[in-house]
Image (cartoon, grey):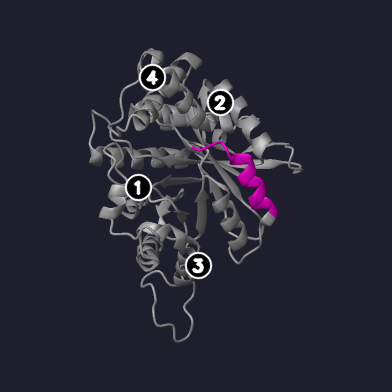
Amino acid sequence: MPDTAQLLPAQFARCLVHRSQWGHSAIMTKISILDLCRITDATNAGSAIGNARDVAAHAEKWGYERFWVAEHHNMPGIASAATSLVIAHVAEGTSRIRVGAGGIMLPNHSPLVIAEQFGTLAHLYGDRIDLGLGRAPGTDQLTWQALRRSPMASEMFPRDVLELQALLAEPLEGQAIRAIPGAGTKVPLWILGSSDFGAMLAAELGLPYAFASHFAPQMLNTALAIYRERFKPSAQLAAPYAMVGLNIIAADTDAEARRLATTQQMAFTNIFRGHRGLSQPPIENIEEYWSPVEKARVQEMLSRSIIGSPDTVRAGIKNLVAETGADELIVVSDIYNHADRLHSFALIAQAAGSD
């Protein structure tokens, strides 16, 4: 496969412009990447993190807005548990693209420690660090116990977000506890969610909101409506800003994209079987892998996926943005082979940049 950095001129990744039901005369939709730092049966954690950095370096040449990684623990196939360290590695290999967490599972941490970590990143890499915050533990209950967190920690999420926000703000005179570094960096916060809870919190605090429809699509439109209706302007954000997560698998043909998508379909099937293993190579016939019940459950979770050639992807993106009024899309392209994944992101940038 040729060097995909040379396949697309930067203008192919310009924002998608179109009219929508939301009343804008023109919506310019930015595209970003959520990288799972997948470990495959042919790689290890080090190469998975290196591949993430390589994707980000290509992505900023193609015009992607941001590159996020997420906190997961005790998952053999995901290498981003030490999320702030992975972000630093990616930021070191890039110069323009925003880099951040999609997200940090705040119930797992002290707000002070997260303010110190992301304040350090901001001092090292300037104003291109994002901090997305989630309420889920990012793991199973047994692992959560190993993290030494209280079962009630998730209930304190709104309070912890406010505490973190205050620690990243300019310190007040006489403030006894400060995040050093961190105080005064004002690292932008995002609320992540897959239900109406995150939508209501993001609206109340006046923060940007990212909905995880790449694995929990059922409440997408309901959550976005709640967020927009209840939004209160804040010092960080004057108007609601909604980002939608979705899976896109792009290849030169629809058939090849469907074949590549079997890697992700097998991964979700394995979750239902209680087995979270390494990423597996694509197979020719997914029907031989899953049962009818497993197929129905996986297809429900992945119902917002766009799988196909550039024309198919282009149509899917336009339809989704027209439906949701999304200000930005953050894309998961969970493909086994690194070169195929780079090619997918190249084609996605081309499709998103086509009028």
- Magenta residues, dominant SS class: helix
Q: Earlier in the sequence, mark 1 or mark 2?
A: 1
Disc with the residue nearer the chain's start (3 vs 2): 3
Q: Is residue 221 above or below residue 182?
A: above
User: Relative to 219, is 56 on the left or the right?
Assistant: left
- Tell me the SS state at disc 4: loop
**Percent x, y for residue 69?**
39, 46
Figure quadrant of residue 185: bottom left
Mark 3 or mark 4, whichever is nearer to me: 4
For the residues labelled 3 and 4, the Cα–Cα distance comes to 44 Å
- The residue that disc 2 covers is 313
**Comparing labels 1 and 4, the label whose residue is closer to the camera:** 4
Residue linked to disc 1: 93
Mark 3 closeness class: few <14, some 14–19, many ≥20 residues within 10 Å: few
> Which disc, if any, is residue 162?
3
Residue at position x 38%, y 72% in the image? 179
- Residue 303 among magenta residues: no
Q: Nearer the viewer, residue 231 or 94?
A: 231
Inspect the image, locate mark 1, and give the three-letter code of the amino acid beneath it: Gly
